[in-house]
Amino acid sequence: MDQPTDQQPTDQHSTHQQSTDVDLVVIGLGPGAESLVTGAAEAGLRVVAVDKHLVGGECPYYGCVPSKMMLRAAHTLAEAGRVGALAGEAQVAPSWAPVAQRISEEATSGWDDAIAVQRLVDAGVTFHHGIGRLTDTGRVSVELPDGTWRHYEASRGVVLNPGTRPAVLPIDGLASTPYWTNREAVQATSLPGSMIVIGGGPIGAEMAQVFSRFGVRVTLLEVAPRILGPSEPEAAAILEKVFVDEGMRVMTGVEITSVSHSDAGFEVSLGSGDSLQADRLLVAAGRTPNLDDIGLETVGLDPSARTVEVDERMRAGDRLWVIGDVTGKGAFTHVAMYQAAIALRDLTGQDGAPARYHAVPHVTFTDPEVGGVGLTEQQARDAGLQVRVGSAPMETSSRGWLHGPGGSGLVKVVEDVDRGVLVGATAMGPSGGEVLGFLAVAVHAEVPVATLRTMIYAYPTFHRTIETALDHLEEGQ
């Protein structure tokens, strides 16, 4: 298509003189953009795609996919431990080797994206491993690994999907230590004897439970008053109890003053004057948007911002679309893919529904799973809605009671009384993320609560707890 040049763009004029004309340039190849570039190429557009790391982004290599393999293994160990209460006797000897092998070979191909790149090439996409930067409206320069440059002018426009990276927390001494993030955790080939996890959000909670169930002595630290801050407090309380009952130490509302490392391991000092020691430290608190080095300033946007504002068609400016985590609409793979479909329709001139985020679902894949959709009770009240809530414990539902050990959880529903529809819900328990599907439809489609109450709920199921939670709406007002 074009020839590389060693000249770095020094001004707008020189960049334009060297540009190759294409239809679309996409910077950042997370799951959303990966599907978008394929669809654009199949629609006949001349597409250039750029990513400085791995095609597919965080999800398939360091996030969703390998972590769920870890969770599947850890939950299998826990289920084996329940045999004594349900079916006799079982002896289990945990081994991390099968987990590490499965992640490397089945999930990530040794953290190699050659297969993903080939899919793009086969679809007709021109792909570069490199650093793509905006230089003006519709114009992108790509710095290749060998130091050469390629420059493009996109008649249709540019799509940004830069994603995020683990945040570097401003804790004294932390940056100089060999701490783990989720990226190192999923690449582990052996396990430490003890671990401190900083961050009680979804990533920290999942990882803490995995390593604890494999025999690691885990201490989970959270600076907020509770773990799982984005979820309903009742769900967080249940999960914390599960963690403690499994032998994990959970400390919330802590102040972390410093971190140090020596041959003996890590030491974490707290504001209370206490200090904690462990062989490993996993930091799973916060993400930093990759907006600081992609040329946003050349199109009138702020490179120091944490998010980019987009409209209902994912437009952030003239011939510019932005999708994924940096839009601030939910740092989830499914949101990025939803946005990618909308952006693709817009840039190819197709009709379709605009973006709506009133029913964004999310699941924390601990055991029990914690699924949520829409608004929490507090968010609904903060939005000025007249609210009533209903909840029911999973253990007293038909399937929850039958399930026995490992059946902790609840269903909670949040109703907008004025409209008579659910605006939020939580499903926590075995297969909580699957039970959530029912509630996500109800919130998304704004199904009247009166209609939900006339349904027949299969017996004995976990989702039958929804019926009980709906019956309790009056009590929760």
Image: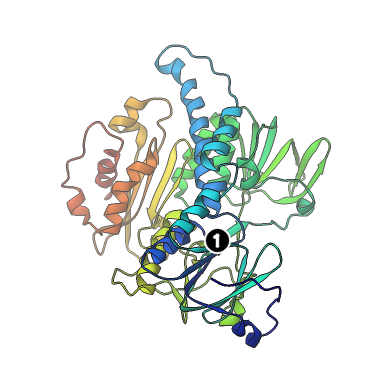
Along the line of sight, which residue is nearer the eye, 385 or 361? 361
Can residue 21 be seen here? The reply is yes
The extreme top residue here reads 88
Looking at the picture, the colour scheme in use is: rainbow
Along the line of sight, which residue is nearer the eye, 176 or 56? 56
- The residue that mark 1 highlights is 163
Along the line of sight, which residue is nearer the eye, 407 or 127? 127
Residue at image position (49%, 14%) is 90
The quarter holding residue 172 reads: bottom right
Residue at image position (71%, 38%) is 280
Disc 1 residue type?
Answer: Gly
In this rendering, is residue 266 above or below 192?
below
State the image coordinates of residue 411 (x, y, percent, origin top left). Answer: 35, 43
State the image coordinates of residue 156 (x, y, percent, origin top left). Answer: 44, 77
Along the line of sight, which residue is nearer the eye, 451 or 143? 143
The quarter holding residue 37 reads: bottom left
State the image coordinates of residue 413 (x, y, percent, origin top left). Answer: 33, 50
Can residue 332 be seen here? The reply is no
Residue at image position (28%, 49%) is 473
Secondary structure beneath dot 1 equals loop
